[in-house]
Amino acid sequence: MSRLVQIWLLGALLVIGGCLATGSEEARVIQNAGNPQSVCGKKWQLVRLRVNGAAIPVQKPENFTFLCNPDGNVMGRSGINTYRGELQITANGQMLWDTSSFVSTKMGGPPQLLQQEHTYLRALSGTRQAFTKSRGKRLILRDASGDIYIEYVRAGP
């Protein structure tokens, strides 16, 4: 066998061996059901909003926050205004909103920012499940079908 063929065969074996050694499993993203301890007592800042499966662009996402305490009081910023309400998060991540308690301030602003805020607040009030991921550094709020999907990152320690 010529030297060139031997080198080619050795190279082919190395490539095949490398492919076989690489696992075919992709890294799994671990997502845990939220609970009062993992969700409440932290400030969350918006990073992603989807409604009806479509991404909603958000200007100044740092102006959209979500906070709750273990007693079920929820508050945050919705772009221009602030909101508050009451919520119960069960041990398995189910969210039970007291919709009669949900209120928002009514300051004015540019129409496109007010529409963005309205979309966010409607989506937020439609969420029914809470999940945490990235070792508790991300919070996902969504409805049962996944049509509404709000993702936050933990802001601060």
Image (cartoon, rainbow, N blue to C red):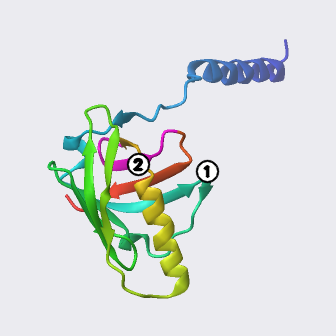
**Residue 86: which numbered mark, if any?**
none
Q: Left of 1 or right of it: where is 89?
A: left
Magenta stretch encompasses residue 141: yes
Q: Position of residue 93 (x, y in %)?
A: 33, 37
Distance from disc 1 to disc 2, alpha carbons, whole Å, reads: 14 Å
Question: Which quarter shows the C terminus?
Answer: bottom left
> Is residue 117 visible to the viewer in this orientation of the structure?
yes
Residue 7, placed above or below residue 149: above
> Is residue 155 visible to the viewer in this orientation of the structure?
no
Q: Position of residue 86 (x, y in %)?
A: 25, 55
Q: Nearer the viewer, residue 118 or 53?
A: 118
Residue visible at 46% across and 72% down?
117
**Residue 53: which numbered mark, if any?**
1
Magenta span covers which residues? Answer: 134-144
Circle 1 sits in a helix, a strand or a loop, which is it? Answer: loop
Please state which amino acid type lies under the numbered disc 2: Leu
Circle 2 sits in a helix, a strand or a loop, which is it? Answer: strand
Residue visible at 59% across and 59% down?
55
Q: Nearer the viewer, residue 147 or 138?
A: 147
Disc 2 target residue = 141
Q: Nearer the viewer, residue 27 or 11?
A: 27
Classed neighbour count for the residue bearing mark 1: other residues with Cα under 10 Å, few (<14), some (14–19), many (≥20): few
Q: Residue furthest front?
A: 100
Question: Which quarter shows the N terminus?
Answer: top right
Please state which amino acid type lies under the numbered disc 1: Gly
Q: Left of 34 or right of it: where is 36?
A: left
Residue visible at 61% across and 23% down?
18
Q: Position of residue 133 (x, y in %)?
A: 37, 41
